[in-house]
Image (spheres, helix red, strand yellow):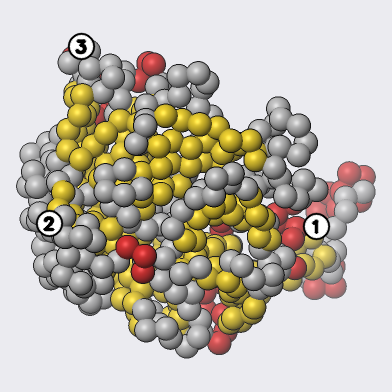
Amino acid sequence: MSTSRQSIDINGHRRQPILLDTNVLITDAMNDDTVATLTSSRGHTIKVSSWISQPPAISYLSFHCHYSSHPRYNNFDELDAKIVGAEGSFILLTALASPRGSERYDYLMYKLHGYGDNGESWSSSLEQVPLPHVYPLPVIEEFGIVPNGGKHFDLAALVVDYRSPMKCSYSMHIYSSKDTNWRVIPMVDPYPEVRKVIATKVITIAEGVLGWVDLDHGVMVCDLREDVPGLRYVPLPAPLPQNWYRLKEFLPGTLAKSFRDLVCVDGVMSFVEMEHRVIVTTEKPSDPSKMQVLYDTDLIVSYNLKDLNKKPQQLQRKDGWRIVSWSRHVSSNCWEKGCEVDAVDISGLSPNLAENLASPTLGVDDGDVVYMRSKASLGKGKMVAIDLRRKKAYQPSFMGERLPTSSSCFGTQSGGDIHLGYSQQVLCSSSPGTHSEYDSVHNLPGQNPTWQFSDPHVMKTLLELNVVSSLLLGCSHGVKICFEAVL
């Protein structure tokens, strides 16, 4: 996503990216400088705080809800929260803020403390986003957020409406914090003959312009500033040959994330796709001439009627991979090819590691560097950064099994540096502050942590985490990309 629109702080400095974990830490330990509190509509006390650190450290949110009327539910196992949107200083959470038996989730908007363009400062705040009164809100995995001056914001979610007439097969659900109202706008499908967009991520294209990304085939772009917002469809590049068949075998969006990604920077979309080559051979019958002795028992088995009717097995063998990047301006009518890199041409990448790489993730600020995961045993693996233009791999990092994703928001450096995180990050931005002491891939965060949590559950979580390396890479456009992998 673009950072230039909101990237200047009170001193005129360009704000630097931070890495924000989308999995919220459930704990009653709060950062006093950033804590925000509210009483929910059901009388529960909710607290959220942020732990912002300069990369390579991971920034994250901590969450706690106290059930005053349900003391038996006041334990960590009954709480759940995750980030479902981030833009500017705003971070949207969905949280289980009632006893688990009700399974009712609330939406909470947490605003990071910081400075506005006019030098105005604000403290961290937390507010509950009311659910619609007249209709149930559909299940929404990702919201677009549009800052709307000062403390206000709009939320937008594109939903497929299967009950509407053919031409109006989408609905846009929009919430405004100014009047605390929801509205639903029927949206005409610009290409009804194309499969519906089931978004797995939302990108910011320009101020008030969002894109709902279905990595299977395309992006629905909507300018929410228009009096009557409409949809524009941007098709993604056609899948590479081996990926055509893979996309047909799975539900929409479930597999494409493992070999495709898209980001938008200053109105320019960057797209990347990875293709694993596979050699298919037919199993050959065994050759008896290679045996010195033929036993009757083996011969009888070989003449079994069921075995005689079996078709030869198709054997598959990996044969490397390639990765291709494309880019286009949103207003363009075509994609232009960027880099095409084969695994064998990448320096610093061992054959064993290269064979198991998948899940390319583009850096938010540029498309020259991608981060890929190597799946290993026990659900753990490594994250590798590859500069496509230079055809160079950088030192791998250990990580967990979730995939990284990218979005953008801005915060202010404050509080102590807590170098911890999980495995799925949202890329955000922070105004300049105290730099982390862990500023290179050789000085790993987490080696000498100073955790101050007293809760045994949190301490156990922290001790099981091993935050490892981060990469800060220069790119061809002079923009720096930061990314962190964790275990």
Residue found at x 49% / y 74% = 367
Dot 3 corresponds to which residue? Answer: 69
Question: Tag 1, which secondary structure?
Answer: loop
Q: Amino acid at mark 2?
A: Ser
Dot 1 corresponds to which residue? Answer: 313
Specify whether residue 84 is in view.
no
Question: Tag 3, which secondary structure?
Answer: loop
Q: Residues within 10 Å of mark 1 (few under 14, many from 20)?
A: few
Q: Quadrant of residue 153?
A: top left
Q: Amino acid at mark 3?
A: Ser
**Residue situated in front as seen by the camera: 308 or 55:** 55
Dot 2 corresponds to which residue? Answer: 414
Numbered label attached to residue 335: none
Q: Residue furthest front?
A: 227
Residue found at x 77% / y 46% = 192
Quadrant containing the N terminus in the rendered view: bottom left
Residue found at x 51% / y 48% = 224
Quadrant containing the C terminus in the rendered view: bottom left
In the image, which is nearer the foreground, mark 1 or mark 2?
Answer: 2
